[in-house]
């Protein structure tokens, strides 16, 4: 599959089949995150895989949407602020950016394997940290439900839902002062 086809095939699924995901498939999606690029190659991420029903129930408390309970696996992508690169000039912490790149690699690998994901960022970060017993420097950044999709995506939805390319691209145009 060409990359652009894969990218168009990925979508935010909110319906999952009640079907177990094999460990080797979970490892493949995690490997895609592991090899993602990061600022100065610091790799400040940690991936926490939740598939035990009792632990899943605890994590559901951090996100108030019923659909998440259908996913057989949750991957919590965390960033380590002690390990992340900070830009010297202004101290900009690239932890979130690096974690987002890893999350995107994971979602695309999942798509290639016929699995579905959905970025969940609107969750109770403090409660999630408490449940996972994370140290202060480790921040849960995104929850990725992972499962076999029970819904279908319109691969042409990008033409309707995304801005046109000329709305998001500029060619060497600088703003006048």
Image (cartoon, rainbow, N blue to C red):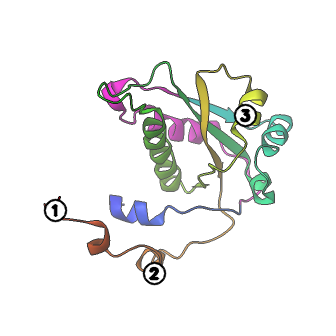
**Residue, x 41% and y 33% (percent of image)?**
94
Mark 3 nearby-residue class (10 Å; few <14, some 14–19, many ≥20)? few
Q: In which image quadrant can residue 38 be found?
A: top left
User: Is residue 138 or residue 29 the one in the foreground?
Assistant: 138
- Check the image and report above or below for 125 versus 109: above
**Residue, x 33% and y 76% (percent of image)?**
164
Give the label on residue 160, or none. 2
**Residue, x 53% and y 50% (percent of image)?**
110
Q: Tell me which segment is drawn in magenta.
A: 16-45
Left or right: where does residue 15 sit relative to residue 164?
right
- Read off the residue under disc 1: 176
- Read off the residue under disc 3: 126
Which quadrant is the N terminus positioned in? bottom left
Which is more N-terminal, label 3 or label 2?
3
Q: CA distance from mark 2 to mark 3?
A: 36 Å
Residue 58 % position (x, y) = 83, 38
Closer to the eye: label 2 or 1: 1
Give the label on residue 56, or none. none
């Amino acid at each position: 599959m060409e990359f652009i086809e894969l990218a168009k095939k990925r979508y935010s699924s909110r319906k999952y089949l009640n079907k177990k995901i094999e460990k080797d498939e979970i490892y493949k999606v995690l490997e895609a995150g592991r090899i993602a690029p990061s600022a100065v190659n610091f790799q400040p991420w940690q991936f926490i895989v939740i598939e035990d029903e009792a632990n899943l129930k605890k994590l559901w408390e951090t996100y108030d949407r019923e659909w998440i309970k259908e996913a057989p696996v949750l991957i919590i992508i965390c960033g380590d602020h002690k390990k992340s690169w900070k830009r010297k000039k202004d101290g900009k912490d690239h932890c979130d950016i690096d974690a987002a790149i890893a999350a995107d690699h994971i979602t695309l690998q999942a798509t290639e394997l016929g699995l579905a994901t959905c970025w969940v960022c609107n969750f109770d970060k403090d409660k999630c940290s408490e449940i996972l017993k994370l140290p202060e420097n480790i921040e849960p950044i995104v929850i990725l439900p992972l499962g076999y999709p029970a819904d279908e995506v319109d691969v042409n939805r990008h033409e309707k839902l995304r801005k046109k390319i000329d709305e998001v691209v500029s060619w060497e145009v600088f703003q006048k002062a």
